[in-house]
Amino acid sequence: MRRVEREGDRWSGDVACPGGFAHGDEELLDTAIRETQEELGITLRPDQLLGRLSLRPSRPWNRLSRFQIAPFVFGVAGDCEPGALEATEVVSARWVPLSVLAPGGARERFWWVWRVSPWLSLPFRVSRVWFEDYDVWGLTLAVLDELGRVRRG
């Protein structure tokens, strides 16, 4: 999905998987199911859970980051399409085939700059994959790469 562009939002306009904070949910699985429904209008059930990927810091380059991402993988019917998108959070949504992420695929590298403060910026060389007009990179690409490795393994 492509996130809405908002000033002050560090993920503004990025391509991402659905997600968010656990606001009173009993389990992280409940959060994943709720956020997918809220953001994409896709109803998931616990019995569709295929597994969970590695827990990841939201900012892997920043050891002080307090937030972690807990990716879950669900199996859904082939005709499962996004429903009503949450307009305050999501601009568009589509399925990206895992084959686009396969090793040896059309990846490019670019410089991304982390603004630590108004006086300090740190450049990082990162990978990206383009699918149509979706620029998949960073944390989203790392999660999808792990999914691709698990699927191939």
Image (cartoon, helix red, strand yellow):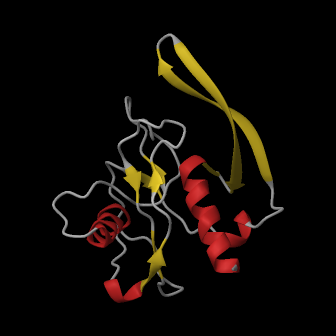
Which residue is at a point 37% across and 29% down the rendered structure image?
Answer: 8
Note whether residue 92 is visible.
yes
User: Looking at the picture, does residue 75 appear above or below residue 19?
Assistant: below
Farthest residue to the right: give it: 104
- Where is residue 96 drawn, in percent x and y? 61, 67
Along the viewing direction, whichever of 46 and 27 lies nearer the viewer: 27
User: Looking at the picture, does residue 80 appear above or below residue 36?
Assistant: below
How many labels were placed on the picture?
0
Which residue is at a point 25% across and 70% down the rendered structure image?
Answer: 27
Along the viewing direction, whichever of 71 and 54 lies nearer the viewer: 54
Note whether residue 97 is visible.
no
> Position of 150 compared to 105: left or right?
left
- Where is residue 92 drawn, in percent x and y? 48, 56
- Quadrant in the rendering for residue 18: bottom left
User: Looking at the picture, does residue 140 appear above or below residue 46?
Assistant: above
Farthest residue to the left: give it: 24
> Position of 82 compared to 147: left or right?
left
- Quadrant in the rendering for residue 64: top left
The C terminus - image quarter: bottom right
- Where is residue 98 drawn, in percent x and y? 66, 71
Farthest residue to the front: give it: 63
- Where is residue 111 drawn, in percent x and y? 70, 32
Which residue is at a point 30% across and 67% down the rendered structure image?
Answer: 28
Which residue is at a point 32% across and 57% down the rendered structure image?
Answer: 86
Along the viewing direction, whichever of 106 and 80 lies nearer the viewer: 106
